[in-house]
Image (tube, rainbow, N blue to C red):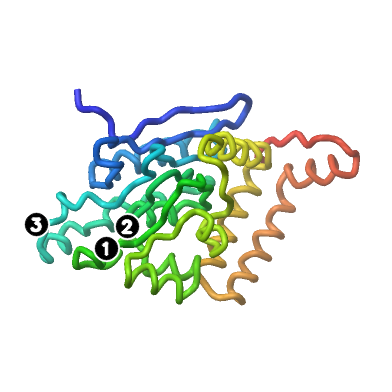
Amino acid sequence: MTEPLVLTQTIGEGARRTGVITLHRPKQLNALNDALMDQLGAALQGFDADDGIGCIVVTGSEKAFAAGADISAMAKKTYAEAIAENFIGRNWETILTIRKPVIAAVSGFALGGGCELAMMCDFIIAADTAKFGQPEIKIGIIPGAGGTQRLPRAVGKSKAMDMVLTARMMDAAEAERAGLVSRVVPADKLMDEVLAAADAINALSPASVLLAKSCVNKAFEGGLADGVQHERRIFHSLFATEDQKEGMAAFLEKRKPAWTGR
């Protein structure tokens, strides 16, 4: 039997738990290829469809979240082949269709496609050992899974240009200062911190969580005026939910809300 390229587990108790997906190509430092990305996409969709899962975590090993794309799988690919098979676009971006929050737990190297995958997650919590980079230019290509687009949105044009054009790596401390990651924690505490963040999300109203993610993504991908209009419509729509009534009643009555997801 072929060894799986991603491992999955469910963590937590109660109505909503956390789905953890671990990239699993240890000998290749989790280098990304089509087979791994197919399995990752299926795991993400499975957790997204499970009403018992409130949050999803994507992680790798201590040495590498993912050290890049699998160069051996790309080296002989032609332009015609890349176009015909819609390379990367066909299956590498399934994560962008996931409605539930997805947290990247990054330790070690997140380079090339690994950095791009982490940036496709909703936010990144990094170990103090993490290193980020887009070194594709050193092998005669450029980032192809959104690196030239998401990186400048996260860290600004100057730092993005520096990293893309020189292949310079950014350590965890600089990544936090630049806004690429939300927080940096000791490596031996990484999963504890990530699962605590997931638990905090799981304890909230599911509808509010899904719609809040949608609104933040609208801001990331579009203009300000359209984003504010979208946010306002979503804000108004939540007054039609039972969770809004329960949440506000609980606040006024100084008790913990009992979310129903309705």
Residue lying at 39% horizontally and 36% vertically, measured from the top left: 22
The C terminus, quarter of image: top right
173 vs 34, left or right, is right
Front residue of this view, candidates 52 and 118: 118
N-terminal of the pair, mark 1 or mark 3, is 3
Q: Would you call the spot at circle 2 few (<14 residues within 10 Å), some (14-19), or many (20 or more)?
A: many
Q: Secondary structure at mark 1?
A: helix
For the residues labelled 2 and 1, say whether their Cβ atoms are less than 8 Å apart: yes
N-terminal of the pair, mark 2 or mark 1, is 2
Residue lying at 46% horizontally and 36% vertically, measured from the top left: 47
Question: Does the image show residue 174?
Answer: yes
Question: Amino acid type of disc 1?
Answer: Glu
Front residue of this view, candidates 92 and 137: 137
Question: Does the image show residue 51?
Answer: no
The N terminus, quarter of image: top left
How far across and how far down the image is residue 58, in percent? 44, 41
Residue lying at 60% horizontally and 24% vertically, measured from the top left: 13
The part of the image, by quadrant, that contains residue 142 is bottom left
Between disc 1 and disc 3, the foreground one is 1
N-terminal of the pair, mark 3 or mark 2, is 3
User: How many callouts does the rendering have?
Assistant: 3
How far across and how far down the image is residue 207, in percent? 63, 46
Residue lying at 58% horizontally and 27% vertically, measured from the top left: 12
Q: Secondary structure at mark 3?
A: loop
Question: Amino acid type of disc 3?
Answer: Lys
Q: Would you call the spot at circle 1 few (<14 residues within 10 Å), some (14-19), or many (20 or more)?
A: many
Gap in Å between the C-alphas at discs 3 and 2?
Answer: 18 Å
Q: Which mark is residue 176?
A: none
Residue position marked by numbered label 1 in the rendering: 136
Residue position marked by numbered label 2 in the rendering: 112
Residue position marked by numbered label 3 in the rendering: 76
